[in-house]
Amino acid sequence: MGLFSIFNKEIAMDLGTANSIVMYNDQIVIDQPSVVAIDTNKDNKIIAVGTEAARYEGRENEHIRTIRPLKGGVIADFDMAQHLIREFIKMADVTRSILSPALKMVICIPSGITDVEQRAVREAAEQAGAKEIRMIHEPMAAAIGIGIDVTEPVGHMIVDIGGGTAEIAVISLGGIVRNKSVRIAGDEFNENIIEYMRKIHSLHIGVRTAEQIKIKVGSAISELREEEVPEDYEARGRHVTTGIPETHLVSYKEVANALDKSISRIESAILEALADTPPELAADIYESGIYLAGGGALLRGLDARIAERTKLKVHVAEDPLRAVARGTGKALKNLDRFDFLIK
């Protein structure tokens, strides 16, 4: 890049509901929760962003508040999203030079985003200092990150289950032929677990504890292979009636029960997308199968459950949490080749 790199900096950002990832020079430089902490006593002054802000969640006082600017995969709080993007760019340290560089960004967005929501993302990035912006839909970025040549005349189905949405898309010739976006994903799974623990065990738990239960003993099916069975997880919370702090062991079978309805809705969306796929592309998908990406792809037994429901092969992406970010980074390096990027 040489002297030219002083005047131009290129970054790729997967702005996620739960986590955001920033790539610079083909390296992941930021991978932190999409959380902002503010002090309401000081005109909503930003006191922490990312991992540090996430430490405050569930432990706020009357003056300290935490905000997740993205909900359901889209910007819910424009001002806080702007701060989040700006602080992550600053933390990535891509603007350090005598002269202020021109920032070129590729930002990943959900395929079901509205025009208004899309403009909000662009404006937030512009306010954060980006001069040239391209956007890419999440399923397309996931496919590129997995290693699929999205420009070929071949159909591929991608299911990207993130924090706020499950993106289901059939891709061919550099475009999304069919897509469905359902706002059932990691956050909804956490709410399912919280509700289950309250109803079945009379234990009130927070989002952070629900997230840990999902990671430690999360499962999409109630019968795992012996080598896949995780140890029960000790969940800590407050008894609904007495208010006294308690613990309760949670098994993967209980989590599978808690998540069953939400996963069924994702399966139904996959079947709807398949039913609406043109015959030639459906034949391609029969040969290649379905590709899973996003944090939800890590849920134990999810691939087996979807394979059983669809009667198709199901592949989990390598490092599915970062597949979208990797694809966004590759798109940044191939702006001329990928003419499907949104200007």
Image: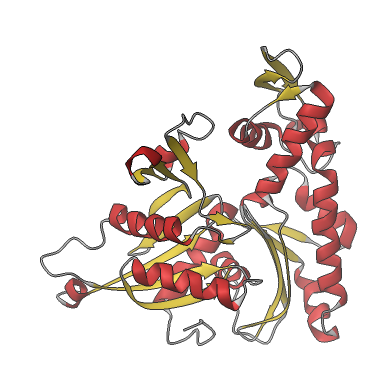
- In this view of the protein, which residue sits in the foreground, 187 or 293? 187
- Residue 96 visible somewhere in the drawing: yes
Q: Is residue 256 left or right of residue 21?
A: right
Quadrant for the N terminus, please. Answer: bottom left
Residue 215: give x, y in percent of width and height.
64, 37
Q: Residue at x 89, y 57 (%)?
A: 309
In which quarter of the view is residue 50 placed?
top left
- In this view of the protein, which residue sits in the foreground, 21 or 155? 21
Q: Residue at x 77, y 35 (%)?
A: 195
- Image position of 191 with respect to 325: above or below: above
- Residue 224 visible somewhere in the drawing: no
> What is the count of numbered marks?
0
Q: Residue at x 83, y 56 (%)?
A: 265
In which quarter of the view is residue 260 placed?
top right
- In this view of the protein, which residue sits in the foreground, 190 or 114? 114
- Image position of 334 with respect to 237: above or below: below
In which quarter of the view is residue 248 placed?
top right
Q: Is residue 99 left or right of residue 242?
A: left
Residue 299: give x, y in percent of width and height.
70, 44
- Image position of 284 with respect to 315: above or below: below
Q: Is residue 141 left or right of residue 91?
A: right
Residue 152: give x, y in percent of width and height.
63, 85
